[in-house]
Amino acid sequence: MISKSLRIGGMLIGYYRLCPRKAWWSVRGIAMEQESDAVALGRLLDESSYNRSDKHLEIEAEAPDGTPLVGKIDRANLKHGVLHETKKGRSCEDAHRWQLRFYLWLLHRNGVTRADGVPFSGQLDYPLLRKTEAVFLESEHYIELENNVAAISSLAIQEIPPPVLTQRSFCAKCSFEELCFG
Ligand code: SF4
Protein backbone atom coordinates (compact mmCIF):
# COMPACT_ATOMS: atom_id res chain seq x y z
CA MET A 1 0.00 0.00 0.00
CA ILE A 2 1.12 3.53 -0.73
CA SER A 3 0.73 4.82 2.83
CA LYS A 4 3.42 2.50 4.33
CA SER A 5 6.22 4.13 2.39
CA LEU A 6 4.75 7.58 2.00
CA ARG A 7 7.10 10.41 2.81
CA ILE A 8 5.32 13.72 2.72
CA GLY A 9 7.15 16.61 1.06
CA GLY A 10 6.57 20.30 0.61
CA MET A 11 5.26 20.10 -2.94
CA LEU A 12 2.66 17.58 -1.85
CA ILE A 13 1.56 19.92 0.95
CA GLY A 14 1.20 22.68 -1.64
CA TYR A 15 -0.82 20.41 -3.91
CA TYR A 16 -3.06 19.40 -1.04
CA ARG A 17 -3.71 23.05 -0.17
CA LEU A 18 -4.66 23.74 -3.78
CA CYS A 19 -6.74 20.65 -4.40
CA PRO A 20 -6.84 17.34 -2.48
CA ARG A 21 -7.52 15.53 -5.75
CA LYS A 22 -4.25 16.88 -7.19
CA ALA A 23 -2.44 15.53 -4.11
CA TRP A 24 -4.18 12.15 -4.61
CA TRP A 25 -2.84 11.87 -8.19
CA SER A 26 0.59 12.89 -6.99
CA VAL A 27 0.87 10.21 -4.26
CA ARG A 28 0.15 7.70 -7.02
CA GLY A 29 3.26 8.88 -8.81
CA ILE A 30 1.41 10.66 -11.57
CA ALA A 31 3.17 13.83 -12.73
CA MET A 32 2.34 15.55 -15.98
CA GLU A 33 4.91 16.87 -18.42
CA GLN A 34 3.75 20.44 -17.74
CA GLU A 35 4.48 19.94 -14.02
CA SER A 36 7.97 18.64 -14.81
CA ASP A 37 8.57 21.61 -17.11
CA ALA A 38 7.53 23.98 -14.34
CA VAL A 39 9.92 22.28 -11.93
CA ALA A 40 12.73 22.42 -14.52
CA LEU A 41 12.06 26.12 -15.16
CA GLY A 42 12.07 26.76 -11.43
CA ARG A 43 15.48 25.12 -11.19
CA LEU A 44 16.79 27.14 -14.12
CA LEU A 45 15.55 30.41 -12.60
CA ASP A 46 16.92 29.29 -9.30
CA GLU A 47 20.41 28.57 -10.58
CA SER A 48 20.69 31.59 -12.84
CA SER A 49 19.27 34.28 -10.57
CA TYR A 50 20.83 34.02 -7.15
CA ASN A 51 23.76 34.03 -4.83
CA ARG A 52 26.14 31.12 -5.32
CA SER A 53 26.90 30.89 -1.60
CA ASP A 54 23.33 29.68 -1.04
CA LYS A 55 22.97 25.93 -0.77
CA HIS A 56 20.44 23.32 -1.76
CA LEU A 57 19.28 21.66 1.40
CA GLU A 58 17.50 18.41 2.15
CA ILE A 59 15.80 17.90 5.50
CA GLU A 60 14.13 14.84 6.96
CA ALA A 61 11.90 14.93 10.02
CA GLU A 62 8.94 13.18 11.61
CA ALA A 63 5.47 14.56 12.20
CA PRO A 64 4.16 14.17 15.79
CA ASP A 65 2.21 11.09 14.59
CA GLY A 66 5.41 9.50 13.23
CA THR A 67 4.77 10.21 9.53
CA PRO A 68 8.11 10.66 7.71
CA LEU A 69 8.56 14.13 6.23
CA VAL A 70 11.09 15.35 3.70
CA GLY A 71 12.00 18.78 2.42
CA LYS A 72 14.08 19.70 -0.61
CA ILE A 73 14.87 23.36 -0.32
CA ASP A 74 15.71 25.33 -3.48
CA ARG A 75 18.28 27.48 -1.71
CA ALA A 76 19.20 28.03 1.89
CA ASN A 77 21.22 30.92 3.24
CA LEU A 78 22.50 29.29 6.40
CA LYS A 79 24.33 32.37 7.66
CA HIS A 80 21.22 34.55 7.60
CA GLY A 81 18.81 31.69 8.37
CA VAL A 82 16.63 32.09 5.29
CA LEU A 83 15.10 29.34 3.17
CA HIS A 84 14.26 30.37 -0.39
CA GLU A 85 11.67 28.89 -2.71
CA THR A 86 11.62 30.09 -6.33
CA LYS A 87 8.35 30.31 -8.24
CA LYS A 88 7.27 31.50 -11.67
CA GLY A 89 4.08 33.33 -10.77
CA ARG A 90 1.84 34.17 -7.84
CA SER A 91 -1.39 32.46 -8.88
CA CYS A 92 -0.86 29.76 -6.22
CA GLU A 93 0.83 31.97 -3.65
CA ASP A 94 -1.05 30.63 -0.65
CA ALA A 95 0.11 27.09 -1.52
CA HIS A 96 3.65 28.47 -1.99
CA ARG A 97 3.52 29.97 1.51
CA TRP A 98 2.43 26.67 3.02
CA GLN A 99 5.15 24.78 1.15
CA LEU A 100 7.73 27.09 2.66
CA ARG A 101 6.13 27.00 6.12
CA PHE A 102 6.33 23.20 5.88
CA TYR A 103 10.11 23.40 5.34
CA LEU A 104 10.44 25.79 8.29
CA TRP A 105 8.40 23.33 10.35
CA LEU A 106 10.84 20.51 9.50
CA LEU A 107 13.70 22.63 10.85
CA HIS A 108 11.64 23.44 13.93
CA ARG A 109 10.84 19.74 14.49
CA ASN A 110 14.55 18.96 14.32
CA GLY A 111 15.44 21.83 16.68
CA VAL A 112 17.52 23.61 14.02
CA THR A 113 17.95 27.38 14.36
CA ARG A 114 20.45 30.00 13.22
CA ALA A 115 23.76 30.09 15.08
CA ASP A 116 22.36 32.79 17.40
CA GLY A 117 19.27 30.71 18.25
CA VAL A 118 16.82 32.70 16.11
CA PRO A 119 14.43 30.49 14.08
CA PHE A 120 14.84 30.36 10.31
CA SER A 121 12.49 32.37 8.13
CA GLY A 122 11.46 31.89 4.51
CA GLN A 123 11.43 33.93 1.35
CA LEU A 124 9.39 33.30 -1.78
CA ASP A 125 11.25 34.54 -4.85
CA TYR A 126 9.44 35.46 -8.05
CA PRO A 127 12.34 36.44 -10.33
CA LEU A 128 10.16 36.87 -13.43
CA LEU A 129 8.05 39.37 -11.48
CA ARG A 130 11.05 40.85 -9.64
CA LYS A 131 9.21 40.31 -6.36
CA THR A 132 9.90 38.56 -3.09
CA GLU A 133 7.73 37.76 -0.08
CA ALA A 134 8.87 36.96 3.44
CA VAL A 135 7.24 33.91 5.05
CA PHE A 136 7.34 33.07 8.74
CA LEU A 137 6.32 30.01 10.71
CA GLU A 138 4.05 30.96 13.62
CA SER A 139 2.97 28.61 16.40
CA GLU A 140 -0.60 28.49 15.04
CA HIS A 141 0.78 26.98 11.80
CA TYR A 142 2.08 23.85 13.58
CA ILE A 143 -1.37 22.35 14.12
CA GLU A 144 -2.45 23.26 10.59
CA LEU A 145 0.56 21.46 9.13
CA GLU A 146 0.01 18.51 11.45
CA ASN A 147 -3.59 18.30 10.24
CA ASN A 148 -2.53 18.54 6.60
CA VAL A 149 -0.05 15.69 7.05
CA ALA A 150 -2.72 13.52 8.69
CA ALA A 151 -5.19 14.35 5.91
CA ILE A 152 -2.67 13.45 3.18
CA SER A 153 -1.89 10.14 4.93
CA SER A 154 -5.62 9.32 4.88
CA LEU A 155 -5.92 10.47 1.29
CA ALA A 156 -3.09 8.17 0.23
CA ILE A 157 -5.05 5.05 1.17
CA GLN A 158 -8.30 6.18 -0.42
CA GLU A 159 -9.22 3.94 -3.34
CA ILE A 160 -11.03 6.66 -5.21
CA PRO A 161 -9.93 10.24 -5.75
CA PRO A 162 -11.48 13.16 -3.87
CA PRO A 163 -14.08 15.13 -5.84
CA VAL A 164 -13.08 17.64 -8.47
CA LEU A 165 -12.94 21.29 -7.52
CA THR A 166 -16.15 23.18 -7.97
CA GLN A 167 -14.26 26.37 -8.82
CA ARG A 168 -13.04 25.42 -12.27
CA SER A 169 -10.97 28.58 -12.78
CA PHE A 170 -7.97 26.96 -11.11
CA CYS A 171 -8.42 23.70 -13.05
CA ALA A 172 -7.71 25.51 -16.33
CA LYS A 173 -4.13 25.96 -15.11
CA CYS A 174 -3.78 22.42 -13.75
CA SER A 175 -2.02 19.75 -15.79
CA PHE A 176 -4.49 17.11 -14.53
CA GLU A 177 -7.47 18.81 -16.12
CA GLU A 178 -7.96 16.19 -18.85
CA LEU A 179 -7.63 13.40 -16.31
CA CYS A 180 -10.32 14.99 -14.15
CA PHE A 181 -12.74 16.25 -16.78
CA GLY A 182 -11.98 14.20 -19.91
S1 SF4 B 1 -8.00 19.65 -12.68
FE1 SF4 B 1 -8.98 20.69 -10.94
S2 SF4 B 1 -9.96 19.05 -9.77
FE2 SF4 B 1 -8.47 18.07 -11.13
S3 SF4 B 1 -6.61 17.87 -9.92
FE3 SF4 B 1 -6.45 19.78 -11.06
S4 SF4 B 1 -7.25 21.33 -9.68
FE4 SF4 B 1 -7.93 19.36 -8.88
Image (cartoon, rainbow, N blue to C red):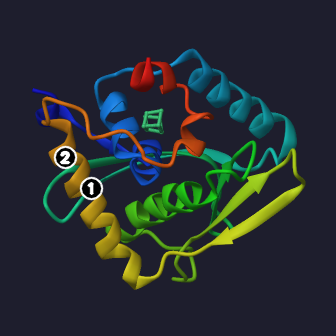
Residue 88 spot, x, y in % from top left:
75, 42
Q: Read off the residue under disc 1.
A: 149
- Check disc 2 and give the amino acid type: Ser
Which structural element holds mark 2? Answer: helix
* Label annotation for residue 153: 2
Do we see residue 87 in this rendering? yes
Mark 2 C-beta closer than 8 Å to ligand 1: no
Which structural element holds mark 1? Answer: helix
Crowding at dot 2, Cα within 10 Å, few <14 / some 14-19 / many 20+, comes out as some
Q: In this rendering, is residue 158 above or below 135?
A: above
Q: To which quarter of the image does residue 141 belong?
A: bottom left
Count up the numbered dots: 2
Q: Residue at x 68, y 66 (%)?
A: 79
Residues at marks 1 and 2, CA–CA distance in whole angstroms = 6 Å
Q: Residue at x 37, y 39 (%)?
A: 164
Q: In this rendering, is residue 45 above or below 89?
A: above
Q: To which quarter of the image does residue 15 belong?
A: top left
Quick check: which quadrant has ligand 1? top left
Q: To which quarter of the image does residue 110 belong?
A: bottom left
Instruction: Please state if 10 lies on the left or on the right of 157 as rendered.
Output: right
Instruction: Please state if 88 lies on the left or on the right of 149 as rendered.
Output: right
**Mark 1 touches mark 2? (CB < 8 Å):** yes
* Label annotation for residue 56: none
Do we see residue 80 in this rendering? no
- Check disc 1 and give the amino acid type: Val
Q: Residue at x 11, y 35 (%)?
A: 4
Residue 46 spot, x, y in % from top left:
75, 39
Instruction: Please state if 50 lies on the left or on the right of 178 as rendered.
Output: right
Quadrant in the picture for the C terminus: top left
Residue 126 spot, x, y in % from top left:
79, 51
